[in-house]
Image (spheres, rainbow, N blue to C red):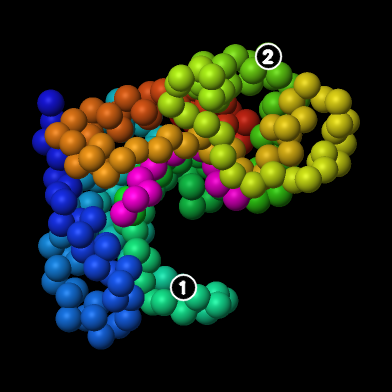
Amino acid sequence: MSENPLGKSLFTFLRDLQENNDRDWFNANKKRYEREVKEPALQLISDFGPRLRKVSRHIDAIPKAVGGSLFRIYRDTRFSKDKTPYKTHAGIQFRHQQGKDVHAPGYYLHLEPGQVFFGGGIYHPDSATLKAIREALDDRTAAWKKLRKDLGDDESSGKTFHLAGDSLKRPPRGYDADHPLIDDLKRKDFIAITHLTEKDALAPGLLDRLEALCRQTAPLMRFLCKAVDVPF
């Protein structure tokens, strides 16, 4: 079973940050953030890279906080009513190599006290990408239905993942309301999510678990990559 670089102090720090989300407190505890959150998260990304490449050679694990897989802790408050300066979670995104040029599928790990989840897919694609995915669903309806079944997107299935994200209230232009995939055609996000616990995130076998989850969502990722014409 593989070693896990994350420790309980990661969630302890984030809980403390939730209660003290201001610059004075953070600056006084910045070394704690770096030691307990940033450095372990970067190590996780580094350790997971070779495993991820076994699933797809085109999804990157880049152990950098700027321009890499780890999201910055600082919030962009310019257009938000919430002016708290810091995120109270650690977000890790494993991006497609062509993600800078096109909207492409990726994986995401969210570490927050009381809310840990892992997902794969495309979040908030632009209109051209969304159109391409909808056309793929329309052209490959049977393949999508099988993918959904294998993914386990059914509460009665006992399987792990469910499709999440925003949806239109009405059918998108060009599609009838009685289309067999109308609920999926209404989607504005195509992401599969599984919820974990803090205990899961701190378990020795986390890297094994993440690799297995990546493999479980690989059919979805492969479908989406083909739809937007990028390799998987």
Q: Is residue 84 above or below residue 169?
A: below
User: Measured from the top left, where is residue 202 in percent x and y?
Assistant: 19, 42
Q: Which residue is mark 2?
A: 142
Q: Quick check: is 88 in the magenta stretch?
A: no
Q: Is residue 191 visible?
A: yes
Q: What residue appears at the point 46 percent right and 19 percent down from the top-left corner?
A: 158
The image quadrant of residue 33 is bottom left
Q: What residue appears at the point 43 percent right and 35 percent down from the top-left corner?
A: 194
User: Measured from the top left, where is residue 173 in percent x and y?
Assistant: 86, 41
Q: Is disc 2 surrounded by few (<14), some (14 to 19) or many (20+) residues within 10 Å?
A: few
User: Measured from the top left, where is residue 112 in percent x and y?
Assistant: 33, 54
Q: How would you classify the magenta stretch by its main secondary structure? A: strand
User: Measured from the top left, where is residue 61 in percent x and y?
Assistant: 30, 44
Whether residues under marks 1 and 2 lie with C-beta atoms below 8 angstroms apart, the answer is: no
Q: Is disc 1 surrounded by few (<14), some (14 to 19) or many (20+) residues within 10 Å?
A: few
Q: Which region shows up in magenta?
A: 113-124
Q: Give the residue type that dot 1 points to.
A: Asp
Element at label 1? loop
Q: Is residue 27 above or below residue 69?
A: below
User: Which circle marks residue 76 in the picture?
Assistant: 1
Q: Is residue 55 visible?
A: no
Q: Give the residue type that dot 2 points to.
A: Ala
Closer to us: 231 or 84: 84
